[in-house]
Amino acid sequence: MANVIRQMAEGSSRLVERYLPDAFLFAIILSFVAFGLALAFVTPQGGTMAHAENILVDGWYGGFWGLLSFAMQMTLILMTGYALAQSAVVDRVLSRMASIPSSERSAAAFVPVVAAVASFVHWGLGLVVGAIFARKIAEEIRTIDFPIIVAGAYSGFVVWHGGLAGSIPLVLNSSGEDNFLLASGVLNSTISTGQTIFTVANIVVFVLVGLVFLPLLFLLMYPENDEKKRPIDPAKLDAATDGGTEADPAVTPSPMSDEMTFAERIEHSSFVAYAIGFSGLLAVAGYFGRGIADGTMPWNNLNLNIVNFTFLFLGITLHGTPSAYIGAMKEGVENVWGIILQFPFYAGIMGIMGYAPEGATSLATQIAQGMVHLSPDGTLPVVAFLTAGIVNVFVPSGGGEWAVVGETLVKAAHSSGASVPRIAMAAAWGDAWTNMIQPFWAIPLLAISGLSVRDIMGYCVLVLIGSGLIIGAGLLFLPM
């Protein structure tokens, strides 16, 4: 069995390394594919040239800048998370955790578990912690196959949408403008997280995928012969700590001295760092405290803004001085260029997928409707899972995807008598599932590790296949 899995992993890795384009080129190719599909299947308004122009201008350009706010939030969560992980306290914790595995194989199995648990708490945390922990493992065991443990770190991300910060379940639990299905009358009331995240089916699927399947798979996939391992060169590992460039030797801030100017004293002042840091953390405590007073538990009050705010002020506090935190943030900014470059292109793809002139149906809605129409009775959860997985390749944003397929799936649940929470969680898991072959969310992890998408995606293909079978069975048969 182990030999079969290992051979499949090696074969998949060779194919991906040969044929998969760079993540940015992947986004460009998807842009052309989405444009061609919209041109062919969305009812035109005017002639062919006018139709193409409308898709290009109203769809692509109209959506191109639609995710700027989200892109900035993503940039900040990666920078603040990276800076937090560089603090002495967090660095020691991660280093001690990295020393737990007693062998290369056990380390390969341990990385996806850590990443999955972090992703279940919050997807942004999972991306940062997974990447940095994989690097810590490589520092601890220099002979380990580096691409496979980085792939393991990314694989933990497959559970994120079933976790505490899952976009779809949190939107359904919202009574504000974000819950567009409630505002449009498709839903009559909110759906609590007790009916989605904290159900038997969802928790069991998380445990089976994140804590059983992933470590077992990476244990079996790990190369048997040293000749097939690809340990990272120490110089490249050091470079990876600075976003792929040669890292400068660590510099310890000088203690206060009489020669320091007033400005330098402020920059190296622990009092300044603690004053602003603790002020921010008090605001975080107040934010969650008010939520609890209003009946909202902390896990239902998580969003990117509060996570960024917490990471920022916790990082300042743990670094101890403004100058130390500034240095960590300067290093972290090297890791976010891919997000900044690619987010507008995926926003443009989302615009094309959602483009629909008056009287027409958008491409994303057509995909959802077609999948639902072809589904046999009783299989709607699996159909919702597959539909979300297909759309996610073009729209790798949980909230953005739900905006274009949610209404179709919920109406199908109503008409077939299926459970709306089950269908919603099926879509949530489908969105997370095909991230294993959609390289967009791997960009920051790859920047931190210094690898390319071709180095890890072959292993992730096997994650896609195995996790898909487990999730699909769980959605069909486990009680909600």
Image: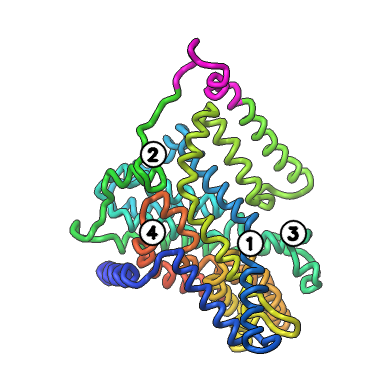
Q: Is residue 83 above or below residue 185?
A: above
Provide residue 210's location: percent of width, then percent of height: 47, 59
Closer mark to the observer between disc 1 and disc 4: 1
Asked whether the beta carbons under mark 2 and mark 3 sit within 8 Å of each other, the answer is: no
Q: Please identify the quadrant where the N terminus is shown.
A: bottom left
Q: CA distance from mark 2 to mark 4?
A: 19 Å
Asked whether the beta carbons under mark 2 and mark 4 sit within 8 Å of each other, the answer is: no
Mark seen at residue 151: 4
Q: CA distance from mark 1 to mark 3?
A: 26 Å
172 left or right of 114? Answer: right
Residue stretch in magenta:
254-274
Amino acid bearing label 2: Ser
Closer mark to the observer between disc 2 and disc 4: 4
Other residues around mark 2 within 10 Å, as few (<14) / some (14–19) / many (≥20): some
Mark 3 lies on residue: 174
Q: Residue furthest front?
A: 49
Provide residue 144's location: percent of width, then percent of height: 27, 51
Closer mark to the observer between disc 1 and disc 2: 1
Q: Is residue 191 above or below residue 261?
A: below
Q: Residue at x 51, y 39 (%)?
A: 329
Mark 2 lies on residue: 95
Asked whether the beta carbons under mark 1 and mark 2 sit within 8 Å of each other, the answer is: no
Q: Earlier in the sequence, mark 2 or mark 3?
A: 2
Provide residue 370's location: percent of width, then percent of height: 61, 86
Q: Residue furthest top?
A: 258
362 left or right of 246? Answer: right
Mark 1 lies on residue: 65
Q: CA distance from mark 1 to mark 4?
A: 30 Å
